[in-house]
Amino acid sequence: MKNLNEVLLGEVEGFRETGHKFLNGEISRGEFKAASGGMGVYAHRSGKEFVIRFRIQCGVVLRKDLELVYDFAKRYSLNSIHLTTRQAIQLHGMNIDDICDIMKEGIVKGLYSRGGGGNFPRNVAMSPLSGVDNDEAFDVSPYALEVSNYFLNKIYTYKLPRKLKVAFSANKKDAAHTTVCDLGFLAVFQNNRKYFKVYLGGGLGRNAKIAVEFPELVEPKDVLYHVEAMTRLFINEGDYKNKARARIRYIMERMGQKHFIDCYNKYLEQVRQDKNLEVHVEEKKYDKSGVEIFIEDPRIICQNKKGLYSLYVHPLGGILSLEDLKLILDETKNIEDVEIRLAMTEGLYIRNLNGMEVKNLLELTKHIGGTTRLENSVACIGAKICQMGFLDSQDVLKSIIDYFKEKKFSQDVLPKIHISGCPNSCGVHQIGEIGFCGKRKDVFEIYLYGKLGYGNTVLASSYGDIHRESIPKFLYEVATILQSSNEQFYLWVENNKMEFEYILEKYTV
């Protein structure tokens, strides 16, 4: 295998030329996107500025990488960074030469954007609390990282029909979305042994599908056989002509579930015969001493070792100011065994804090985001920046939060809201209890009753259209009723369906 860094560095200047051809009108937006996505770069809607997406492997943010991201942002006069819904970090509003310079320096220092978009294996997703979670079957971190490294070390070699998403979840809550991705591994502990349940052919966006469960439990050491088998199946059976149907779920739809699994097994056996891909890892041991505290706050999570905690930090819409990034870096610098992991919810967890450390950081970060589920809502970057977006999801989220503040309503009664600017579902509106999807000028489509979790995943259904300016009022009316009923949203709707439908009719168009 060629040296990864040498290959990636050798690509940058050619990409720089492509970027300038796009800016000079020599190639189209579509032609540029075909070249830029695989580099982890996209043009803004303006066509003059760009975004670079760093592959933060499985959401595990090494301190050196977060410091480098901060340095890049400060050096190029950015005000913030963007935490995505797939555990990546994006820098927005840059020119093509600065993007290429950043890419080069990142490669040399081990921070990569290659394969961050385009027809490549994307960043491997993982439960952000894996390894410290009270409810986990086992720590999936070493297996997810093995797969991530397997992809990264040959990322420049892939010729896929479209993107391939792989995820690892540590328990039935499915924080990494294994049940709605192309290939998912969900940890279970049965008969005193560790296994993965494997999920095939799921995905969000247009024609969303819940993944199909593979009929056999899989030993953790065998994960790379499944990754390679799915990759080969995708390459050989995927649709290279019709991009709209070039995902794993369409292959399953075309073949039928039984034939697809038979085909998958054929590739699995072929891979086993071709090479040894067994994974042998050691789970990380945490030796830090704990200090207990007795503070009830939804941002504080008790870890599986007594007296140790994780703190969740959620900047509004995933937009973390440079000032707040610096605060997090400074305040965690001298904490023993501290870790930072990105979530699939546009936030981050600061892990392995003792009681005094989590108490201090809770106070220092309270201004960054709220404590209610509504304040922890998710929104994609929106149509002001994204060339695919129909509507500005970030503005809508801000208008919701501002409206509730104006009404002085702070009760934690609404579920987390998921807002996507278009049907691509970057705001994962299809797995939220309440979701909105940009549809046309000033109109969002309402999605309701989505769920995520092993044996419990349900795709949200469409319940009509709503004007952008009506969304805060609609949510506020629902919130006031939930407050008086003292019931969770899902349960209240089940018991009061006619009343809820009446409210919907008042706002839908």
Image (tube, helix red, strand yellow):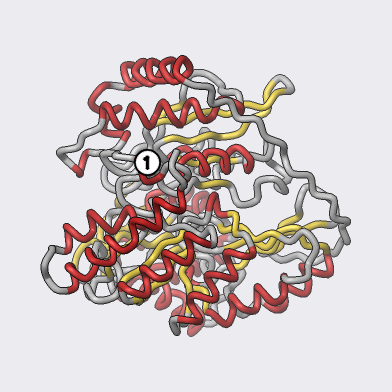
Q: Amino acid at mark 1?
A: Leu
Q: Locate residue 43: give its quadrant.
A: bottom left
Q: Can the viewer see residue 21 in this picture?
A: yes
- Count numbered badges in the picture: 1
Give the residue displayed 84% in from the left and 69% down from the top.
356
Badge 1 element: loop
Is 2 situated above or below 435?
above
In the rendered image, the quadrant that contains the N terminus is top left
Give the residue displayed 72% in from the left and 70% down from the top.
332
Is 82 situated above or below 342?
below
Q: Locate residue 260: give its quadrant.
A: top left
Is 420 situated above or below 273?
below
| Residue where numbered disc 1 is placed | 164
As drawn, is 90 to the left or to the right of 290?
A: left
Query: x, y (%) of residue 447?
Result: 35, 54
Relative to the observer, which residue lies in front, 59 or 360? 59
In the rendered image, the quadrant that contains the C terminus is bottom left
Give the residue displayed 85% in from the left and 57% down from the top.
307
Q: Can the viewer see residue 498 in this picture?
A: no
As drawn, is 506 to the left or to the right of 142?
A: left
Is 215 situated above or below 141?
above
Query: x, y (%) of residue 376?
Result: 53, 66
Give the residue displayed 49% in from the left and 25% down from the top.
225
**In this view, which residue lies farthest toward the left?**
26
Query: x, y (%) of residue 202?
Result: 38, 37
Relative to the observer, which residue lies in front, 297 or 13? 13
- Few, some or many residues within 10 Å of mark 1 (<14, 14–19, 20+): many
Query: x, y (%) of residue 407?
Result: 49, 82
